[in-house]
Image: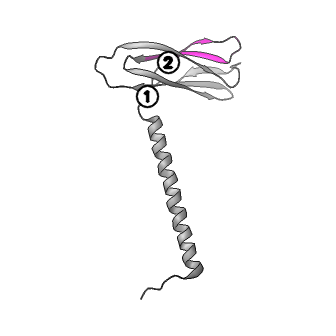
Amino acid sequence: MAERLTGEARDRVRASALTFVGGMTILLVAVALYATLVEGTSVVPSSVVAVSDDGRRVTVELEHTTCEEPAEVTVDERTDEVVLTARVTTAEDDGCRPVTSRESVTLAEPLGTRELRTTRP
């Protein structure tokens, strides 16, 4: 025959169950938000075309199609290099033509002697 929990033991089981359910809810919401933000974007080829005199502003040229719109250029600043990643959002259309566009980003610290490169898809 099964025993029933009483008092403090029952409260602990309830608290554990609520903590588990709350944690899973937060995890699922975070995954859904991440999927919403990342879905529909892709990395495209890009190249650096200009760096401002003070080394803080960098302009890149993105290679994409007329069916894609520039979404963002992310900056990964390290002590020895700066890596730029260009992303576009994709729309469905059969009449896409190649096109280039330019985007500028501002670095947290001046470029200085760090290597500047872009990522490739």
Q: Position of residue 112 (x, y in %)?
A: 71, 18
- Residue at 38% across, 16% down: 66
Q: Which residue is mark 2?
A: 46
Q: What is the magenta range? A: 47-63
Q: Which residue is mark 1?
A: 42
Q: Is residue 61 magenta?
A: yes
Residue visible at 60% across and 79% down in the picture: 8
Q: Looking at numbered disc 1 in the image, what kind of residue is underneath it?
A: Ser
> How far apart are the two marked residues, 2 and 1, measured between alpha carbons?
12 Å
Q: Amino acid at mark 2?
A: Ser
* 60 up-or-down from 121: above or below: above
Residue 117 quadrant: top right
Question: Residue 31's spot in the image, x, y percent?
Answer: 47, 46
* Residue 86 visible here: no
Reply above or below: 62 against 26.
above
Asked whether, in this view, residue 35 is left or right of residue 16, the answer is: left
Estimate the x, y position of residue 84 in percent, counting from the top left.
Answer: 56, 24
